[in-house]
Image (cartoon, rainbow, N blue to C red):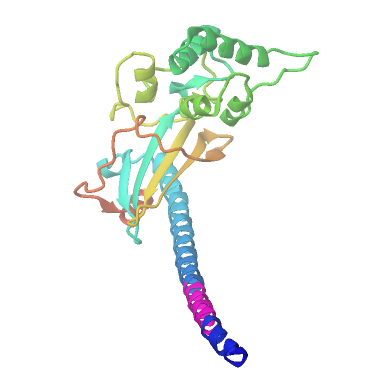
Amino acid sequence: MRGLLPRRARPSRDGFALVAVIWSLGLITLLGMAVMVGARYRTRVASNYTSVATVETAAESAINLGIATAVAGLAEPNGKFPLRCRLPGGERVLVTVEEETGKIDLKTASPAVLTRFFTALTRDQSLGARIAGRIVELRKPKDGNAGAPFATIMQLDQVEGISPRLFRAALRLVTVRSGRPEPDMDAAPPALRLLLNLGEKPLSAARGLPAGGSITIRADVKASDGARFIREALVSLAEGGKPFLVREWRHGDIDTSALAPRNDTQAGERGCFRTAQAVAS
């Protein structure tokens, strides 16, 4: 009887070994699947990075096309803004222009204009007045110096009371290049007119671009795979003896409320190279 005991324990050991093998195979399978999924994810991420880099480069080219068109001042209808064209890679391009005189100048706007603007943005009269007061305070000379005037609209986020959401909402509607106590409403962006309850009044085609002063050129580029990139350039026209001067580059924010919806299937969309050739001629 004692000699038979080891033989009876052997099936238990064999069963444990079988379970261990099954668990090992399952673990190897899971690890293999994880490696495959990780490889696919890395490939997809790399593809997304490549796509974003492509549309970013396309946006730079579109800005240059917008500058060339603005400087040339074409009378040809297809050369007017907004420009819609297609790049050789299939990216759809929308280039628009906004006059800085139609925006709220952080350096020179009156306290009343600032209060009205930020009250409309925040929907809180008390908060709007406080933000306006802080902006005016920043502009005052301190200790005989010229104070801390705004050199760029990106400094707006340094004002106490400006939240990230409010900063993004105000960014496209403010400037530091107007020099006006109140905006020129004939040149104001539609979003600003609607915000101040002045009704929508887009820039008249007959008005054209100013012979001098500053404009913001905005390029909105969308690839066929859905990747999108927006680039903005603050450009001064006919200043310092030069036809133009790029003062600032910015990454634009997607804001569908500020512009009419894009129609990516619009008929008659010409190639951007054809537009560039028209500008050159």
Residue 97 location (% of width, % of height)? 40, 35
Residue 43 location (% of width, % of height)? 46, 66
Residue nearer the viewer, 277 or 195 = 195
Is 113 placed above or below 83 here?
above
- Which residues fall within the magenta stretch? 14-29
Residue displayed at 48% across by 70% down = 30
Query: Could you tell whether 267 is left or right of 196 in the image?
Result: left
Is 113 placed above or below 258 here?
above
Query: Could you tell whether 130 is left or right of 194 in the image?
Result: right
Question: How many marks overall?
Answer: 0
Residue 172 location (% of width, % of height)? 46, 29
Residue displayed at 62% across by 89% down = 2
Is 80 placed above or below 62 here?
above
Q: Residue furthest left?
A: 267
- Taking the magenta stretch, the answer to whether it contains residue 237 is no
Q: Residue furthest front?
A: 1
- Taking the magenta stretch, the answer to whether it contains residue 18 is yes
Residue displayed at 49% across by 15% down = 118
Residue displayed at 35% across by 30% down = 257
Residue 254: quadrant of the picture? top left
Residue 137 can be seen in this image: yes
Residue nearer the viewer, 148 or 237 = 148
Residue nearer the viewer, 243 or 123 = 123
What is the quadrant of the N terminus in the image? bottom right
Residue 183: quadrant of the picture? top left
Dominant SS type (magenta): helix
Residue 40 location (% of width, % of height)? 44, 67
Q: Residue furthest right?
A: 143
Is 86 placed above or below 209 here?
below
Residue 139 can be seen in this image: no
